[in-house]
């Protein structure tokens, strides 16, 4: 898609981070979502182990991703985990998600990361197809959770 800028957010970009969280809320159909406190979101942006990339068109955040750096003990090179990635529905299938993947991979290679990884639900054929199409190599794993509330 033309005229789409990809930007890595800094501590000065709280409003664009909030816009991205609203994109996630919309795309992931999060019912009864409560936006966290702005001070908390600002504190995330100031961390060196968390980063956010957004796609911007006409001064509006239309997609983006969040990622965490995981420091290893097997290697001095960190791993990077893409936690969320979404593009507003009307902008999907236009190369925006692919450009976000490319951008984070370039960034992480420059920072010396060993690999970037992301999880997708087995029932989410669209996500599985997307990550395969962007060069992702699937691994068969089962994800376990321990709800604490």
Image (tube, rainbow, N blue to C red):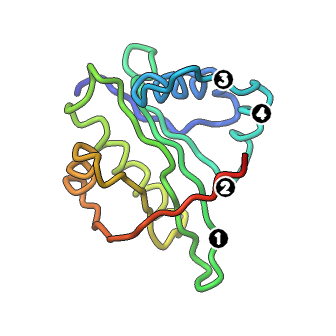
Q: Distance between the residues labelled 4 and 3?
A: 10 Å
- Tell me what residue is drawn at x 37 percent, y 19 percent: 57
- Tell me what residue is drawn at x 71 percent, y 51 percent: 148
Residue 71: image tag: 1
Neighbourhood count class around disc 3 (C-alpha, 10 Å): few under 14, some 14–19, many 20 upward: few
Q: Name the residue under label 2.
A: 49
Assign a secondary structure to mark 3. loop
Q: Kindly indicate whether the residue at mark 3 contacts the one at mark 2 (C-beta within 8 angstroms).
A: no
The mark closer to the camera, 3 or 1, is 3
Q: Distance between the residues labelled 2 and 4?
A: 15 Å
Q: Is residue 107 above or below residue 9?
A: below
Q: Kindly indicate whether the residue at mark 1 contacts the one at mark 3 (C-beta within 8 angstroms).
A: no
> Earlier along the polypeptide chain: callout 1 or callout 2?
2
Residue 132 versus residue 124: which sits nearer the camera? 124
Estimate the x, y position of residue 80 in percent, counting from the top left: 52, 61
Q: Kindly indicate whether the residue at mark 2 contacts the one at mark 1 (C-beta within 8 angstroms).
A: yes
Q: Kindly indicate whether the residue at mark 3 contacts the one at mark 4 (C-beta within 8 angstroms).
A: no
Estimate the x, y position of residue 9 in percent, counting from the top left: 58, 36
Neighbourhood count class around disc 4 (C-alpha, 10 Å): few under 14, some 14–19, many 20 upward: few
Q: Name the residue under label 4.
A: 40
Assign a secondary structure to mark 1. loop
In which quadrant will I find the C terminus? top right
- Tell me what residue is drawn at x 59 percent, y 46 percent: 51
The mark closer to the camera, 2 or 3, is 3
Assign a secondary structure to mark 4. helix
Q: Distance between the residues labelled 4 and 1?
A: 23 Å
Residue 35: image tag: 3
The mark closer to the camera, 2 or 4, is 4
The mark closer to the camera, 4 or 3, is 3
In which quadrant will I find the N terminus? top left
């Amino acid at each position: 898609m033309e005229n789409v800028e990809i930007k890595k957010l800094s501590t000065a970009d709280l409003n664009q981070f909030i816009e991205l969280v609203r994109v996630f809320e919309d795309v992931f159909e999060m019912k009864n979502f409560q936006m966290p406190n702005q001070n908390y979101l600002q504190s995330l942006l100031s961390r060196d182990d968390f980063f956010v990339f957004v796609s911007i068109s006409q001064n509006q955040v239309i997609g983006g991703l969040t990622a965490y750096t995981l420091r290893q003990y097997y290697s001095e090179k960190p791993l990077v985990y893409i936690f969320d990635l979404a593009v507003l529905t009307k902008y999907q299938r236009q190369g925006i998600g692919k450009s976000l993947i490319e951008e984070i991979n370039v960034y992480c290679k420059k920072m010396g990361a060993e690999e970037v990884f992301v999880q997708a639900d087995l029932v989410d054929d669209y996500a599985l197809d997307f990550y395969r199409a962007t060069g992702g190599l699937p691994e068969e794993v089962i994800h376990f959770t321990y709800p604490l509330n």
